[in-house]
Image: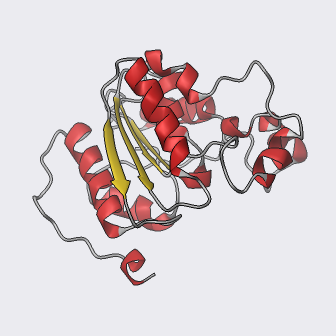
Amino acid sequence: VRAGFNDAERKALAELGFIVVQIDGRGVPFRHKAFQDESYGWVESASKLEDHVAGIQQLAKRYPYMDLNRVGITSHTTGGPGGVQGLLHHPDFYKVGVQKTPHDSRLMSASMLGEKFEGLSGPDAQCEYPEQLMKQLKGKLLLSCGMLDDVCPPAITFRLIEALQKANKDFDLLLLPTLGHASSSYQWRNCWDFLVRHLLESEPPKDFHLTTAFDYL
């Protein structure tokens, strides 16, 4: 699994039996400016998923127990839309994608993100948003978002849902009616169950009650 968001998620996925990989692709901050400029003008391309694919392929040569036929990808909020774009841009590599709180610079209330990374004129006309690539979807996809999210509005998820329906693609969806721009234990558990079911090909424990720090926020 190529994981995102935080260290706790990576550790949890490893405990479930996954080999977990996190790679800083070109475009992420705190590097040389040339490194960050790789994604300037198209914030959706930050972290360069092709770097992640190449990195995992190289690791699999070093560690042959890594199964390249069962690679998943997760992403959360401004960690980018990798859970969706991984399946669309690399449909033969990523088999399962989990996207919590999808990110779209056009619809985010925090519009300064788009201006900072794309300029006032927005992204280049050659850039393709996920809904333009839905026909390329092959793997299993789970979308999840909070209906009260004021940073990444539910409209972002709905735009993806409409595109998936128009492309006649199957997908899974989890909407949390009272959740804002955060996560919940129920959301985490369902996301992990999805990965276990479709990557480990094992049925997760039924009605397992997960308790995390998000329960006390």
Residue farthest toward the bottom in the current orientation of the protein: 216
Identify whether 181 is placed above or below 168. below
The x, y position of residue 16, in whole percent, is 26, 57
Q: Nearer the viewer, residue 163 or 140?
A: 163
Q: Residue 168 in the image: state x and y as whole percent.
A: 35, 18
The answer to whether 145 appears left or right of 207 in the picture is: right
The residue sitting at 47% across, 39% down in the picture is: 158
Residue at image x 65%, y 23%? Answer: 128
Is any part of residue 61 visible from this angle? Answer: no
Q: Nearest the camera: 197 or 112?
A: 112
Q: Measured from the top left, where is residue 75 in percent x and y?
A: 50, 48
Q: Is residue 113 left or right of residue 50?
A: right
- Colouring style: secondary structure
Please give the name of the residue rendered at 56% of the width and 36% of the height, measured from the top-left corner: 52
Residue 53: x and y in percent read 53, 31
- Asked if 13 appears above or below 35 in the picture, the reply is below
What's the residue at 88%, 40% (across, down)? Answer: 119
Q: Judge from the rendering whether residue 214 lies leftward or rightward of residue 153; answer left or right.
A: left
Q: How many marks?
A: 0
Instruction: Note whether residue 93 is visible.
Output: yes
Q: Quadrant of the N terminus?
A: top left
- Nearest the viewer among 66 and 82 is 82
